[in-house]
Amino acid sequence: MVESKSWLEAILGKKVGTFCYPFGDYNEEISFIAKKVGFKGARTTERFIINSPKNFFTFGTTINVYPQPFRKKNENHYFGRYLLQPFLQTYSGAKKMGIPTYKMLRWKTMAISAFDITLARGEVFHLWGHSWEIDKYGMWDELENLLKYISFKKNCEYLTNGQVVKINQNENFISTRRLSS
């Protein structure tokens, strides 16, 4: 973690404030190490989370860019044995969030529905994906269309993970100061 953080900071010429746990796997010890090396927050891969995190070292996500509802080998071929895996892995979280089942049949319609629900509730929409998977599954057009849809919404702020952490930490600091005055 230390070497990766230093390497990225040398390339970018600025501090790197947030971290993504590899494969989303973490525990208290790993979160402690992330804090100790200087990260201000860290993201998991837990999905269908739309509320501002209480602990910025277990920051969840709303949705990831991945084919729905079927498991694909590549852009044009499917896995027979694991065909329904994406749908089965997302169904309960998407349903709890309020996404209708028929919108879970395509990644883009599920993402738009998740965004609309998040915006209506005034919560945090967190989209993530791996560029190699987006390329492998031929999803660049869907992602671009989703981003166009999102980009023209009013009453919405567009922030990085680091900005969300910073704003919320400042608000907590201000709230704490108000309570103690």
Image (cartoon, helix red, strand yellow):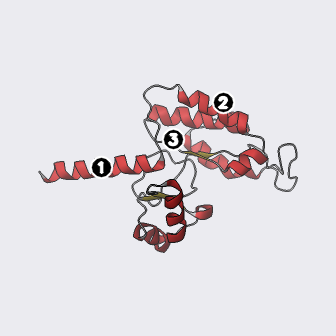
The residue indicated by pointer 1 is 170
Name the front one of labels 3 and 1.
Answer: 1
Please indicate, yes or no, whether residue 52 appears anywhere in the rendered image.
no
Q: Check the image and report above or below for 78 versus 139.
A: below
Name the front one of labels 3 and 2.
Answer: 2
Q: Position of residue 94 (x, y in %)?
A: 61, 44
**Residue 125: mark:** 3
Are there few (<14), some (14-19), or many (20+) residues within 10 Å of tag 3? many
Are there few (<14), some (14-19), or many (20+) residues within 10 Å of tag 1? few
Seen from the viewer's position, the closer of residues 148 and 108 is: 148
The secondary structure type at the circle numbered 1 is helix
- 175 relative position to 97: left or right: left
Q: Check the image and report above or below for 40 versus 164.
A: below
Q: Which residue type carries mark 1?
A: Asn
Q: Which residue type carries mark 2?
A: Asn
Please tell me which residue is depicted at 63% across the width and 32% down the height of the picture: 146
- 10 relative position to 56: left or right: right
Q: Position of residue 91 (x, y in %)?
A: 66, 46
